[in-house]
Image (cartoon, rainbow, N blue to C red):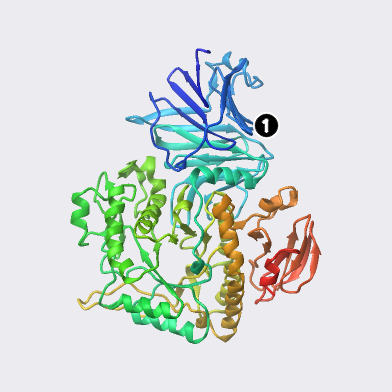
C-alpha cells in the first residue's frame, strides 16, 4: 500500500499534507470526487440524492493509484493530480498544474517539482471550516460545452464563457454540463461562485465552502450521459396531461370576476385552455398565503365554474413574509426565516418590506405548506406558480444571509430546489401525485420534484426571444426537461403596436412547439387604475389585456391556429414527457443530441428538436417571410406546412409567413399523422 493511498471496496482515498481526497463509484459509468483540507468530509449529498450502486475497482499503479467504474477511469499521481479517461484510454479531463517544467509528464515528473507549482486545487481559509476554493482543469481548444442551466446570452456553446454560479431573476444556475468529448460533469456544490470555460483552462471558484464535490460520467452518446446523470440526481415525473395544452395568464387578474370573464371569453369562443393563472398580490398580505376575500370572495365557486369549462386553476405563491403578516411573529419566534446577519432584517421590498421563508429548513416547509393546503388546496386549486424562487433579494449580498443549511455563500443556490420540494412532498402527502410547479428558478435535482422552470421576467424583443431558445436548450441539457418562457416576453410589449404584434405571433408559434405553451406578460400601456381596498390602500397594479383576442382579428386568427396545432400535438407531448421521465432526455433538444455524428449539427444554435421527431426553426427577425434551415444528415425530412420532402445533410430555404413556423418531421414518424 502506498503511503498516500488507501483502498476500500469501490473507493480510492488519498492523503498528503493537509489535503484528503475520496473518489468512489457513483452509479453507472461514473465517479464522485470529494477533496478538502478539513479532517473529514461533510455528510451532505445535495443533489446526488438517489440510491446508487458502487461497482468501481480501485488499484495501485506505478505512478500512484487509479479507480475504474465501467466506461470511466480516474488516475491519481503520488502528487495528487487527477485525470479522467474513457474506456478507449482517451483523456476526458485533466487537472491543470503550472510547473517550472512545462513539459512534465502526468506521473513521476510532477513529484520533482512539488515546490514549484500552481496547484489545480487551492484552499484559502475564510472562517471556521470554510475555504475559498479554486479548481482548475486543462482546456481543450476543440471542446464544446453545453448545459449549466439558464443564462441570458447569445451563445449556446459555453466554451469561452464566464458564468456566475448565482440564482437571479432570468438566470438559473444548474452546474451540470455535457461535452462533445463524451462526458458529463456536475459540480455538486450550491455555493456562490463562478465557472469559467476559458481557452487556457477551465476554472471553478467558490467563495465559501467546506469541500469540493463533483461527479463525472462517460458514455458513448449524450443520451447515455444524461441517463446516467439523471439516475443519480432524479428524473422528472410524467407531466400531468392537463398541463400539456394552452396556459392563459397575465399580470394580473385583479378580481375573481375578471378572471372568470376571461375564462368565459375563451369558452364562448371555443378556444381551448387547460390552465388559467391567478398571479401575484391576490393575497391579503405576503406570507399569509390566502385569497383576499374582498376581491376573491368565493374561490370554491370559481374553481367549480372553471372546471365546468375544462380549465384548471393555478395560483401564484411567493416565499416572502410581510412584516405585518399574521404569520410573521410565529415564523420569527421559531426561526423559520432566512436570517440577515447585519442591518435591517427585511430582504425584499415589493409593495411592502418582507423577509424570506427559509425553504432549506424542513420545519419551514411543513409549516408553510400546511397553511397553503388549508387556504388553497381545500378550495380546489390544482397547482402552484412558485415565483421569486431565487430568492430575489433586494440586495443580493449572499454573505449577509444565513440559512438553516449554512451561510448564504455556501448554500444559497439550492433554495429553488428546496422550495419546489416543499410542494412536491406536501402534495404527495395529501394524495396528489400529478404535481407540476411553475417555478422561476431551478437547481440540480429540481426536476424530480416536478419543477417546470420558466425563464423569468425577460424583455419583449426579438433578440431576447432568440436567447430564450438557447436558454431552454441548455437548461434541458442540465437535467431540467420541463421548461418554458413567457410568450411575448414579460416586459416592454405594447399591445397597440404592430411591432409587438409581430413578435407575439412569432413567439406564440414557438410556444406551440415548446414543452409547455404559456401566454404571459406585463403588457403596455398601463392605463388600468389599480383597485383600492376598503381600507383605502391601493392594490398592486395590472398591465394591459393579454388574451388571444386582445390584439385584433388578424392576430387572433394566427394565435388560434397555433393553439389548434398544440392540441393536435398533445399525444406527442405526452410521449416525450414520458421519455424524459424514463431516461432523462430533455423535451426540447439540440440538433446534435439526436444527430451526434453530424458535425454541422453541433454548430446549429437557432434550431432545435422537440422530442426526437420534430425539427423546429423559429423566426427571430422582424419583417422576415423566409428562412434558411439546416436539416441533419441521415434522414428524409417532411416539411409540415407543405408536405415537401427533403434529404438531410444540407440547408433548405423555406417560406415563413407570419402564420407559419418552419417545422420538419422525420419521414416515418407518427407525429406526421397528428399534424395533418
Asked whether, in this view, residue 355 is left or right of residue 158, the answer is left
Q: Nearer the viewer, residue 558 or 523?
A: 558
Q: Which residue corresponds to the image point at 49% horizontal and 45% vertical from the top-left?
A: 233
Locate residue 188, reporting x and y percent. 47, 39
Element under label 1? loop
Give the farthest residue toward the front.
431
Q: Nearer the viewer, residue 50 or 614?
A: 50
Q: Nearer the viewer, residue 401 or 632?
A: 632
Label 1: how many Cα within 10 Å (few below 14, some 14–19, many 20+): some
Label 1 belongs to which residue?
87
As displayed, is residue 388 above or below residue 248?
A: above
Locate residue 325, reporting x and y percent. 22, 62
Asked whether, in this view, residue 334 is left or right of residue 209, the answer is left
- The mark total stands at 1
As displayed, is residue 484 above or below residue 185?
A: below
As displayed, is residue 146 above or below residue 239?
A: above
Locate residue 499, reporting x and y percent. 58, 75
- Screen quadrant of the C terminus: bottom right
Locate residue 269, reporting x and y percent. 51, 86
Q: Which residue corresponds to the image point at 37% horizontal and 54% vertical from the top-left?
A: 425
Q: Quadrant of residue 127?
A: top left
Residue 44 visible at all: yes
Amino acid at each position: 500500500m502506498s503511503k498516500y493511498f488507501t483502498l476500500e471496496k469501490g473507493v480510492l482515498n488519498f492523503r498528503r499534507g493537509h489535503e484528503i481526497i475520496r473518489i468512489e463509484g457513483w452509479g453507472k459509468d461514473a465517479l464522485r470526487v470529494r477533496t478538502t483540507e478539513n479532517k473529514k468530509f461533510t455528510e451532505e449529498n445535495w443533489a446526488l440524492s438517489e440510491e446508487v450502486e458502487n461497482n468501481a475497482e480501485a488499484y495501485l499503479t506505478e505512478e500512484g493509484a487509479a479507480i475504474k467504474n465501467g466506461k470511466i477511469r480516474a488516475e491519481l499521481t503520488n502528487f495528487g493530480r487527477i485525470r479522467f479517461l474513457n474506456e478507449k484510454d482517451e483523456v476526458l479531463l485533466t487537472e491543470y498544474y503550472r510547473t517550472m517544467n512545462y513539459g512534465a509528464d502526468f506521473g513521476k515528473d510532477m513529484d520533482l517539482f512539488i515546490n514549484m507549482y500552481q496547484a489545480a486545487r487551492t484552499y484559502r481559509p475564510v472562517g471556521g471550516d470554510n475555504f475559498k476554493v479554486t479548481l482548475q482543469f486543462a482546456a481543450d481548444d476543440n471542446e464544446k460545452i453545453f448545459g449549466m442551466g439558464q443564462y441570458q446570452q447569445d451563445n449556446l456553446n459555453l466554451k469561452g464563457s464566464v458564468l456566475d454560479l448565482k440564482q437571479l431573476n432570468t438566470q438559473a444556475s444548474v452546474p451540470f454540463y455535457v461535452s462533445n468529448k463524451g462526458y458529463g460533469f456536475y459540480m455538486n456544490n450550491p455555493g456562490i461562485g463562478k465557472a469559467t470555460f476559458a481557452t487556457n483552462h477551465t476554472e471553478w471558484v467558490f467563495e465559501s465552502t467546506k469541500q469540493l464535490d463533483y461527479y463525472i460520467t462517460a458514455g458513448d452518446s449524450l443520451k447515455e450521459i444524461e441517463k446516467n446523470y439523471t439516475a443519480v440526481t432524479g428524473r422528472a415525473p410524467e407531466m400531468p396531461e392537463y398541463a400539456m395544452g394552452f396556459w392563459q395568464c397575465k399580470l394580473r387578474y385583479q378580481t375573481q370576476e375578471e378572471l372568470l370573464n376571461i375564462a368565459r371569453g375563451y369558452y364562448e369562443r371555443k378556444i381551448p385552455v387547460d390552465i388559467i393563472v391567478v398571479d401575484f398580490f391576490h393575497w391579503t398580505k405576503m406570507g399569509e398565503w390566502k385569497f383576499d376575500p374582498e376581491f376573491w370572495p368565493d374561490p370554491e365557486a370559481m374553481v367549480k365554474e372553471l372546471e365546468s369549462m375544462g380549465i384548471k386553476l393555478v395560483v401564484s405563491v411567493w416565499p416572502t413574509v410581510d412584516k405585518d403578516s399574521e404569520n410573521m411573529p410565529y415564523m420569527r419566534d421559531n426561526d423559520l426565516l432566512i436570517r440577515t446577519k447585519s442591518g435591517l432584517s427585511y430582504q425584499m421590498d415589493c409593495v411592502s418590506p418582507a423577509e424570506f421563508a427559509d425553504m432549506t429548513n424542513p420545519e419551514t416547509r411543513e409549516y408553510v405548506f400546511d397553511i397553503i393546503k388549508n387556504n388553497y388546496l381545500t378550495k380546489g386549486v390544482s397547482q402552484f406558480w412558485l415565483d421569486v424562487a431565487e430568492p430575489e433579494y433586494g440586495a443580493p449580498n449572499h454573505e449577509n444571509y444565513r440559512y438553516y443549511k449554512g451561510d448564504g455563500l455556501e448554500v444559497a443556490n439550492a433554495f429553488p430546489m428546496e422550495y419546489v420540494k416543499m410542494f412536491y412532498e406536501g402534495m404527495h402527502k395529501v394524495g396528489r401525485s400529478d404535481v407540476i410547479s411553475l417555478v422561476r428558478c431551478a437547481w440540480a435535482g429540481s426536476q424530480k420534484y416536478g419543477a417546470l422552470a420558466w425563464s423569468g421576467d425577460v424583455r419583449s424583443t426579438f433578440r431576447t426571444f432568440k436567447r430564450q431558445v438557447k436558454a431552454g436548450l441548455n437548461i434541458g441539457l442540465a437535467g431540467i426537461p420541463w421548461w418554458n418562457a413567457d410568450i411575448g416576453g414579460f416586459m416592454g410589449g405594447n399591445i397597440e403596436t404592430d411591432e409587438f404584434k409581430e413578435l407575439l405571433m412569432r413567439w406564440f408559434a414557438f410556444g406551440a412547439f415548446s414543452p409547455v405553451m404559456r401566454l404571459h406578460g406585463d403588457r403596455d400601456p398601463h392605463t388600468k387604475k389599480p383597485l383600492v381596498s376598503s381600507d383605502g390602500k391601493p392594490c398592486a397594479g395590472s398591465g394591459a389585456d393579454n388574451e388571444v383576442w386582445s390584439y385584433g382579428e388578424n392576430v387572433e386568427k394566427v394565435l388560434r391556429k397555433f393553439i389548434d396545432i398544440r392540441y393536435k400535438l398533445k399525444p406527442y407531448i405526452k410521449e416525450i414527457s414520458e421519455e424524459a421521465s424514463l431516461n432523462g432526455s430533455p423535451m426540447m433538444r439540440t440538433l446534435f443530441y439526436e444527430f451526434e455524428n453530424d458535425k454541422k449539427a453541433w454548430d446549429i444554435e437557432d434550431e432545435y428538436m422537440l422530442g426526437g421527431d420534430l425539427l423546429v426553426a423559429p423566426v427571430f427577425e422582424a419583417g422576415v417571410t423566409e428562412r434558411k434551415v439546416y436539416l441533419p444528415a441521415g434522414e428524409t425530412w417532411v416539411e409540415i406546412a407543405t408536405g415537401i420532402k427533403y434529404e438531410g445533410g444540407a440547408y433548405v430555404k423555406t417560406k415563413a409567413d407570419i402564420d407559419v413556423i418552419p417545422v420538419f418531421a422525420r419521414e416515418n414518424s407518427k407525429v406526421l399523422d397528428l399534424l395533418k
